[in-house]
Image (cartoon, rainbow, N blue to C red):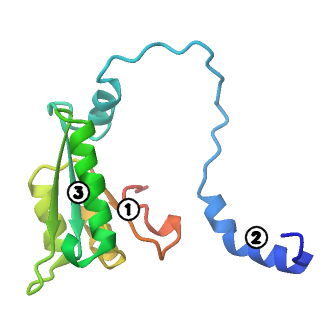
Amino acid sequence: MSSKSEAQLKDELTKIWSEFSVIRATPDQTLVLDPEKEPEDGVFSRFLGIIGAKDSKYLKVAFVHEYPPYRSGWTYSHELGRMHLDHVFQGKISTSYYTLDEHTADRYAAIEAAVEDGNHIIFTTNETLLEASLKAAVKYPKVKILNCCVHRRGDDRRCDERK
């Protein structure tokens, strides 16, 4: 940074400012030095309540992939993460994955199938699934639908935040 001019720094900061503007300041922050101990399943219970799945004993998480894991390192890495969730949170989280069929690549239908199977959170793992993710998020407001892609700014991927 020390080798850049003031104009260059200003230009670069202007380009990334939108990333900072999505961070919301909360004025009611307090420092808790002695937090209350959470029950073992506290985080899961609270999260299930937030998404309207209080009657469920476990969180259902789905991953919708554009390509099968053997064809894409990006998809394979998401599959490793999904399997890790299954292993670490065994009995508290149930995961599944959906891959688009090469002959009928109906992105919205794949997401809708994940919703119909009762998933509480759906991760779509490709930028090409963003439009279908947004459409499904509007139709199914109780399901959290999150799109993971590297070529878009953060504020473009917040499918689950609706006003």
Residue 93 image position (x, y, % from top left)? 21, 39
The 10 Å Cα crowd at callout 1, few under 14, some 14 to 19, many 20 or more, is many
Relative placement, left or right, of 152 versus 99 is right
Identify which amino acid the numbered label 3 is placed on.
Tyr
Image: 87 above or below 40? below
User: Earlier along the polypeptide chain: callout 3 or callout 1?
Assistant: 3
Residue ranking furthest to the bottom:
103
- For label 1, the SS is loop
Residue 141 image position (x, y, % from top left)? 28, 53
Residue annotated with mark 1:
159
The 10 Å Cα crowd at callout 2, few under 14, some 14 to 19, many 20 or more, is few
Count of numbered tags: 3
Decide which of 55, 38 is in the foreground and name it: 38
In which quadrant of the rendered view does residue 108 lie? bottom left
Residue 14 image position (x, y, % from top left)? 74, 73
Residue annotated with mark 3:
140
- For label 3, the SS is loop
- Quadrant for the N terminus, please: bottom right
Which residue is located at x 35 percent, y 29 percent?
Answer: 43
| Foreground tag (2 vs 1) | 2
Decide which of 14, 91 is in the foreground and name it: 91
Residue annotated with mark 2:
13
Q: Decide if residue 121 is in sight here.
A: no
Q: CA distance from mark 2 to mark 1?
A: 26 Å
- For label 2, the SS is helix
Identify which amino acid the numbered label 2 is placed on.
Leu
Image: 36 above or below 77? above
